[in-house]
Amino acid sequence: MTLLLHTADWQIGRTDARFAAEDAAALAEARIATVERLAQRAAERGADAVLVAGDVFDAQAISPRTLRRLFNALAPFPGPWVMIPGNHDAALAEGVWADARRQDLLPPNLQLALQPGVVELPALRLAVLAAPLTQRHTFDDTTAWFDGARTPAGWRRVGLAHGAVQGLLAESIDAPNPIAPDRAARARLDYLALGDWHGAKAIDARTWYAGTPEPDRFKDNAPGRMLWVRLGEAGELPQVEPEAIARHRWRELALPLAVGSDVDAAIALLAACGGDEVLSLVLSGSVDLAGHQRLLRARQDAEARLRALLVDETQLRLAPTDEDIAALQADGYLGAVLAELREAPPAKARTAQDALAILASLLAEQRELPPSRTQSVQPLAQGAGA
């Protein structure tokens, strides 16, 4: 038996503008840490080789420090690494791979295929048919040459490619970098290791996407995994075993709010989230001022505890009750402003709700301040009414 570790789509150097700078930096750091953990697992289980099916890097311009840290992360596994470029890190004349070679950063046990060809691993009696991308997008099947590729008699044939298997997407979508869905059968492959799809996915018994080992999207398609592939004799079906490897768990939740118990449930959910969670929370429906203030405090607590939190309130309507307004103890000018915001016409409803939430927060905060600080705030409110 030969044991391979199949992985892809590391996307090293990826930054995500959706998150605060601190969170984006930590998520980028986690990608390198996950590669190091992957190398450690390969060493622990005695893998014979690691296959990386493209998009090692997220872009062509990667800092020298990040390049060094990535290749240092491979060190725990001393066996052969076989890599190809994908669409994000295509093998351009001047790009990330050219930079890495120029700086002499590639470890000696890394076999990097920058052109289509067969990578031979004689000790394993294994021929890796490599189909790197030499440009970001192509509408030719870069694996077509696999069918006629000659390999030593009796050796196992494994394909390594990056692209979109035809038939996975809607018929109206003309996907770049297409791969024939029956390529493994047509090319007499024992296994076809693919990258590009960011979740672990079986196309057939011999064809798999590994997915990204560290999630980068709020999509429930089995991300955060690597694949163990056991090969027997040439022609035998491989045994494929996914293993979870990710540091962070990404979740997207939609919570409709209508009554107080819905707010309680949302607060309980936030309180139950762990420090490694990346959560996207979409709130809809309506909530009173008191409930909104409770949610705000729960969000602030969660933001300090979770790795990252995104909250979308664009579908949430603020519906203050008479009790809410009375509790704010606002009279005179501020009372008139609150009344005007509550009665805003539909065209200005969203802006009015945002203003109402801000004003309610300020008034609630002022009520909770000690006397000395409250006195310093009061003149501002009086000035606003002058």
Image (cartoon, rainbow, N blue to C red):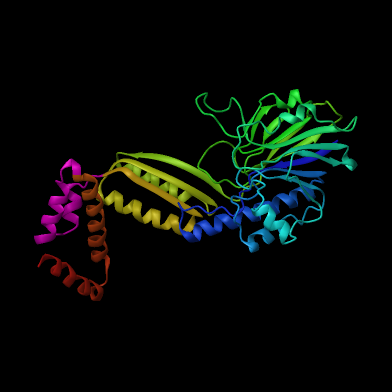
Which residue is nearer to you in this view: 193 or 199?
A: 193
Quadrant assignment for the C terminus: bottom left
Which residue is nearer to you in this view: 53 or 295?
A: 53
Which residue: 9% across, 61% down? 332
Magenta segment boundaries in residue numbering: 318-347
Left or right: 127 in relation to 268: right
Left or right: 59 in relation to 316: right
Residue 190 visible? The answer is: yes
Q: Is residue 249 magenta?
A: no
Q: Which quadrant of the figure has residue 208?
A: top right
Left or right: 150 in relation to 210: right
316 in relation to 171, above or below: below
Left or right: 25 in relation to 9: left
Q: Which quadrant of the figure has residue 264?
A: top left
Which residue is nearer to you in this view: 45 or 112?
A: 112
Residue 205 visible? The answer is: no
Q: Picture coordinates of residue 312 (x, y %)?
A: 37, 46
Q: Picture coordinates of residue 336 (x, y %)?
A: 10, 55
Which residue is nearer to you in this view: 270 or 244?
A: 244
Q: Picture coordinates of residue 365 (x, y %)?
A: 27, 63
Which residue: 22% across, 53% down? 356
Q: Is residue 325 magenta?
A: yes
Which residue: 54% across, 29% down? 174
Magenta segment, principal secondary structure? Answer: helix
Residue lying at the far bottom in this picture: please name it. Answer: 372
Quadrant assignment for the N terminus: top right
Q: Picture coordinates of residue 245 (x, y %)?
A: 66, 46
Q: Which quadrant of the figure has residue 196?
A: top right
Query: How many numbered circles are shown?
Result: 0
